[in-house]
Image (tube, grey):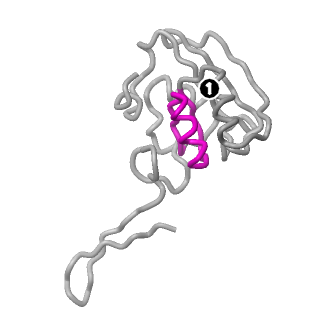
Amino acid sequence: MSASQFEAGTSIALLSSVTIAIPVSQERISPVLDAAVRLLLVIRRRGKEVERKEFVLSPLPPEGLARSVAELRVDVLLCAALSEPLLRALERRGVRVKPHLCGEVESVLRAFGCGRLTRQEFRMPGCWGPHLHSGCCRRRSVARNDKSSGEKTRTDTSA
């Protein structure tokens, strides 16, 4: 899968095999990967699930956690939030990370398989626009009319 297909949410049905990892908490995507306790691994071949395993994650620094995930041969990791060091460590090991996601695990898996993860219902609260790798949530500017000059200005509403 090319990077552009991945970012666009293209269906994985044409891939011969893909291993998806999702950090899980109470049957939903865990809020922060770095602190997750359970990791669900789903293997799909030709668009159909063929295997599912769950692993207990030990508390590890970013490099150790990334190494553990990569050793499971994960192709794609679907998650909510993660630290920048963990993101970089996973990417160095060839794991594609799809961050800023939320929802019930089964719904997210179905949406991923159909290329529909960009739908509003799967976005973390506060995320605007498409799920881009770094910082879709960091900045949001709003056009405003300046009443004194009549000109339009942009205001950064980031927290």
Question: Of residues 83 and 24, which is closer to you in this image?
Answer: 83
Question: Of residues 153 and 3, which is closer to you in this image?
Answer: 3
Task: Quarter of the image for the N terminus: give it.
Answer: top left
Question: Of residues 63 and 52, which is closer to you in this image?
Answer: 63
Q: Is residue 63 left or right of residue 112?
A: right
Task: Describe the element under mark 1 as helix, strand or loop.
Answer: helix
Q: For the residue carrying disc 1, how many other residues have a C-alpha within 10 Å: few (<14), some (14-19), or many (20+)?
A: some
Q: Residue 131 location, x and y as percent? A: 44, 44
Q: Is residue 85 above or below residue 110?
A: below
Residue drawn 53% across the image and 10% down it: 45
For residue 86: magenta? yes
Q: Quadrant of residue 24?
A: top right
For residue 141: magenta? no
Residue placed furthest toward the bottom: 148
Residue drawn 52% across the image and 68% down it: 159
Q: Residue 38 location, x and y as percent? A: 75, 33
Residue placed furthest toward the left: 150
Q: Is residue 84 above or below residue 138?
A: above
Residue underneath mark 1: 70
Q: Amino acid at mark 1?
A: Ala
Residue drawn 37% across the image and 25% down it: 2
Residue extent of the magenta highlight: 76-100
Q: Residue 149 location, x and y as percent? A: 20, 87
